[in-house]
Amino acid sequence: MLLQMHKEKVLKKIVYSALSALIMSALSSQVAMAGDVAAFDIEVVNATSDTFTKGPFAVSISNGQSPKVNSIIFKNDAFSFLSIAPHQFDSGNHKYYIDHCYDRFDDQVCDGLWHGSNLGAQWRTDSVYYVKQERSIVNSNVTDENEIIYKQIDESGQGVGKIVTDNIMRYGYHQTLGIAKLDNKTFYLTSPYDDVVENEQKYGNFAEAYSFIKLEDGRYLVGGYSYNGKFDYNAYANCYGGDLNPDYGDYLNCPGFRTQATIWVIDPNTQNDGDTIKGIQPNEYIDADNDEHLVFGNIRGFINLNNNIIAYGYSSSDKRGGAFYQAWSVATYWPLNVTKTEVSFKNKGDTIAGMDMPGHGSEDYAYTDLVSVSSNGYIVTNVKLTSSENSNYAKNYGYSKFKLTTKEGEETATISTDNVRYPLHNNPIKGANSEGWSVNAQGFVVGWRDNRTEKTPVNYAISRVQEGFIHNINDNTTYYLSDLICSNANNEKKCGSEGKYYNIRWGVQINDDNVILASGFEYPDLDSFNNQKNSKIVTLLLKPNESTFITKTNEDGSSYKTINSDLVVENNNVQQNTDSNENNSRGSFGIFGLMVTLFSVFIFRRKENC
């Protein structure tokens, strides 16, 4: 009995000590570690709309030290229910739908993300009965609701994306087309296949543009995805005329079309404003022959390596993932034949070295994706795991690099890649999540990972809060973006401009001038920051100053840039709510949650010892 009482006293002391340390850590969050100036200065790029209130969320930037900025606002919140970053949401890109909420999280959590003001249920209802749900913002200007939804822009603020037309087809489907605004002309982009007519009913084309590259002769290659000529009646009908049930709801069938990676060739010098351009597709998927699959692929971008033009993104494989009608996707790149008269795919696509195809060489991957390539060939990939690690089916950011090998006597280079590496796999805990989203020529990668305090289960519980990061491929250093926006002059922490405080949730893009585009939370004062209240979502530009980077030398004599660690100032704040101008009332763990968890551990251990 005395031994039992002693054990309980020791356990109590451990629990209360840990609790005190956590509370003191949270209450002293304004105490900085180092740095008289912030590593990155903050510039807020904001805009609001009366009816589109979710956002603005960062999407893309142009090149330059003062780039053009593209962000997006939504009428409803589908991304929380799907557990993806807001800028990843795309009703035609159903790769992310494989992970059904009710298969991963607690039923009450999913119900809370579905029902309520302008959440998942409203998104699905608006989708079925057709209400426009998203608008683009270029710099701080909200586009007209009938305008393009941009995915990528250039220095002039023009670019490519999609447009939802007033052309209504079967089951209320409003035709979706790719669109490009380049050189002050507008071009409409369609599939290479015509619309389908069955039983005197017409089923419309579907296309969306994601990226573009300008060639030396003034032409543009635009990449994305479009309808691939195979029609799935049931999926189409369920998407646009199905029920509104969140538990295996019919939104899983969307967009109802089988799609394939697509390239459009645009020549503003010879083509007219308003022209419609048909796309070009590979002859086949990298490995998808089963007609039961609602297969899909996408071109996320292009790179020109020593006059070798490569498209990259993902293709489908021949293994099933998630629901029966979905195929696994594979990170893929396509070397292109580009001449003055022809653009074509050299093959059906190649995969990244060391990244086995989901369902084939590896049963560990649900899908893989090639999301970004720098101008000099650095590669960013992501994988979704099928096996749970520490109660989480984690996502892992990886990186690689393109290699060009020209054999003697040959004019054409052989294109290959280095083996992919996963620097944040099981880091800092087993089952940790991370997603890279953009890489620049200096080897800096931005993305998001679990908040540094997250150690909670995910499966059949609640999703983890995410926090933006930057990783340096050259020396394998990683920092939270929120720790790079604070100064500590005269022992007074300052984390923004004009007295406002910021916490950065998603790192979305970094250009070759090391300017970072991100989405984050803005707080009007320190009290609001510490108590997680009065926050709103903002799109942020993070601009480096003269002391942000230092130069280091490799063993071979080459040099590289790395972030000056003296400017890193701890700035953590768990924030989960993405509603603009609302308190963090849903899903936040916080100090009270820590107290409950620690107390629960104590009670469990006490019962276990009795």
Image: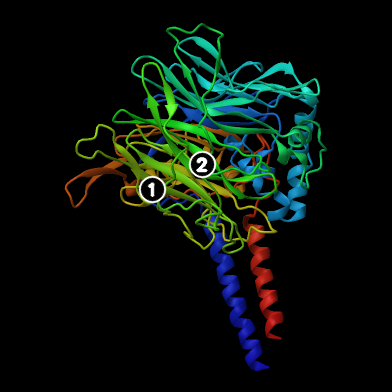
Q: Nearer the viewer, mark 2 or mark 1?
A: 2
Q: CA distance from mark 2 to mark 1?
A: 44 Å
Element under disc 2: loop
Residue drawn at (31%, 46%) of the image = 564
- The answer to whether residue 460 is seen in the rendering is yes
Residue drawn at (51%, 41%) of the image = 286
Left or right position of 454 against 460: left
- Residue 598 image point, x, y percent: 64, 68
Please say if 458 is above or below 8: above
Left or right position of 133 against 300: right
- Residue 450 image point, x, y percent: 54, 52
Task: Report the quarter where the N terminus lies.
Answer: bottom right
Residue nearest the viewer, comparing 435 with 45 = 435
Give amino acid for label 1: Val
Number of labels in the image equals 2
- The answer to whether residue 486 is seen in the rendering is no
Give amino acid for label 2: Ile
Residue nearest the viewer, comparing 32 with 329 = 329
| Residue highlighted by disc 2 | 286
Left or right position of 50 against 541: right
- Residue 605 image point, x, y percent: 66, 78
- Residue 364 image point, x, y percent: 54, 58
Q: Residues within 10 Å of mark 1 (few under 14, many from 20)?
A: many
Left or right position of 198 against 74: right
Task: Report the quarter where the C terminus lies.
Answer: bottom right
Element under disc 1: loop
| Residue highlighted by disc 1 | 568
Q: Residue 600, labelled with which disc?
A: none
Residue drawn at (37%, 51%) of the image = 419
Of the numbered discs 2 and 1, the one sitting upstream in the chain is: 2
